[in-house]
């Protein structure tokens, strides 16, 4: 089987949390673009526990147009979980994620798909001309993008942009927790995906209001720590913890030896030396780091083996055309 870059069916996924006024405009804009695309398209709108009448409006949309599917979550689970629910219901070979608040422009979708068909697994939108306030939105976002690019080694200008196109196989390899949706490109890269970005249009919020404040910064930073760990050491945690454990514990041990020597050979008093505390602290910390690494090793095995999760991902397997795949050559 030859890997084919052309995508047929397309699923568009958008999470909705109290966006009642944006929904009809969103519907109109989506339909206009879908009608212009020469391929089958479905839209999955995920109602993330809205309480402003979005639920009823969404059901009206589903009633009006069979290409729209509405997934109603039981309560507000957050944007990432809502997106994950949408991805789970999407059946297309390509999945487009976007916001439902009309800040992303559905007109960009065909271009994202073209780029995907050039052979990428993820095409990430880049709000080059972003229409949000500078101090509270753009500055934190620029800092975050710089930091995420450095830490993950996947340089993108705009991790926070929801408008992204994915090949659906790639999403299957990526599990979403916390504020993780913004890290999908980095996680996809971890799974061996080809990632690129493309400038997209961004509009100021006209309908409703943003669901986030500055509190998001802390959550993103913590998720970045998780992602960094997943990207580099998830399969060999002792390598991180153990290294620091040995270095710290080793220095502490040598220092303690030296202090013992001073005491035994020269009868120096140790109780009033801060160095003694430091040496003890370093040995203890070292031992703890190594034990933590060992526990993490056990955890990693549970994680991969309990779900029969391979420690690798396969792009595709090549067989001679027509060969029976199940058979052993010559059978
Ligand atoms: N959203 C959601 N659940 C939440 C918060 C937000 O489904 O708990 C949706 C929201 O309806 C919107 C998208 O996620 O479609 C992005 O949210 P928002 O526009 O508030 O974020 P911003 O664009 O301000 O970063
Ligand atoms: Mg928005």
Image (cartoon, rainbow, N blue to C red):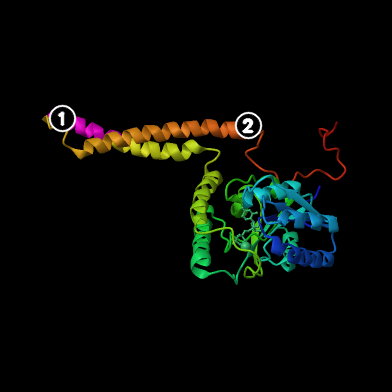
Q: Which mark is residue 166?
A: none
The magenta stretch spans residue 225? no
Q: Dot 2: what SS?
A: helix
**Distance between the alpha carbons at the discs numbered 1 and 2:** 51 Å
Q: Nearer the viewer, residue 262 or 230?
A: 230
Which of the two labelled residues, at mark 1 and mark 2, occupies the earlier sequence position?
1
Q: Tell me, yes or no, if residue 40 can be seen here.
A: no
Q: Identify the residue position indicated by label 2 in the image.
A: 305
- Say which of marks 1 and 2 sits in front: 2
5 or 90: nearer the eye?
90
Identify the residue position indicated by label 1 in the image: 263
In percent of width and height, residue 194 lies at: 66, 55
Rendered residue at 20%/30% (across/down): 260
**Magenta residues (range):** 253-265
**Horizontal and vertical percent for residue 94?**
76, 55
Q: Quadrant of residue 128?
A: bottom right
Q: Is residue 140 left or right of residue 259?
A: right
Ligand 2 falls in which quarter?
bottom right
Give residue 81's position: percent from left, percent from top.
64, 48
Establish whether ligand 1 lies closer than 8 Å to the Cβ of label 2. no
Label 1 sits on a secondary structure element that is helix
Q: Quadrant of the C terminus?
A: top right
Q: Residue at x 63, y 31 (%)?
A: 305
**Which x, y percent locates residue 302?**
59, 31
């Amino acid at each position: 089987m030859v890997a084919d870059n052309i995508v047929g069916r397309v699923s568009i996924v958008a999470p909705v949390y109290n966006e009642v006024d944006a929904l009809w405009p969103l519907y109109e804009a989506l339909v206009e673009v879908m009608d212009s695309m020469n391929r089958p398209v479905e839209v999955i709108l995920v109602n993330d526990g809205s309480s402003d009448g979005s639920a009823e409006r969404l059901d009206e949309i589903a009633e009006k147009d069979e290409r729209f599917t509405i997934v109603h979550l039981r309560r507000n689970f957050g944007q990432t979980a809502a997106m994950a629910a949408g991805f789970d219901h999407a059946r297309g070979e390509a999945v487009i994620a976007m916001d439902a608040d009309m800040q992303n422009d559905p007109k960009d979708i065909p271009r994202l798909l073209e780029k995907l068909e050039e052979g990428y697994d993820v095409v990430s939108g880049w709000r080059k001309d972003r229409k949000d306030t500078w101090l509270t939105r753009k500055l934190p976002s620029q800092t975050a993008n710089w930091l995420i690019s450095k830490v993950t080694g996947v340089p993108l200008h705009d991790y926070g942009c929801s408008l992204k196109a994915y090949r659906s196989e790639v999403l299957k390899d990526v599990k979403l927790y916390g504020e993780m949706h913004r890290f999908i490109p980095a996680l996809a890269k971890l799974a061996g995906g080809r990632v690129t970005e493309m400038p997209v249009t961004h509009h100021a919020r006209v309908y409703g209001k943003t669901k986030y404040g500055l509190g998001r910064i802390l959550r993103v930073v913590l998720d970045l720590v998780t992602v960094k760990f997943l990207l580099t050491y998830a399969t060999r945690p002792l390598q991180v913890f153990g290294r620091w454990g040995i270095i710290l514990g080793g220095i502490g041990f040598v220092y303690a030896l030296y202090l013992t020597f001073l005491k035994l050979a020269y009868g120096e008093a140790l109780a009033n030396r801060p160095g003694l505390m430091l040496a003890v602290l370093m040995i203890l910390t070292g031992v703890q780091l190594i034990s933590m690494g060992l526990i993490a090793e056990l955890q990693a095995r549970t994680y991969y083996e309990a779900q029969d999760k391979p420690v690798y991902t396969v792009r595709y397997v090549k067989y001679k055309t027509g060969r029976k795949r199940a058979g052993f050559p010559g059978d």
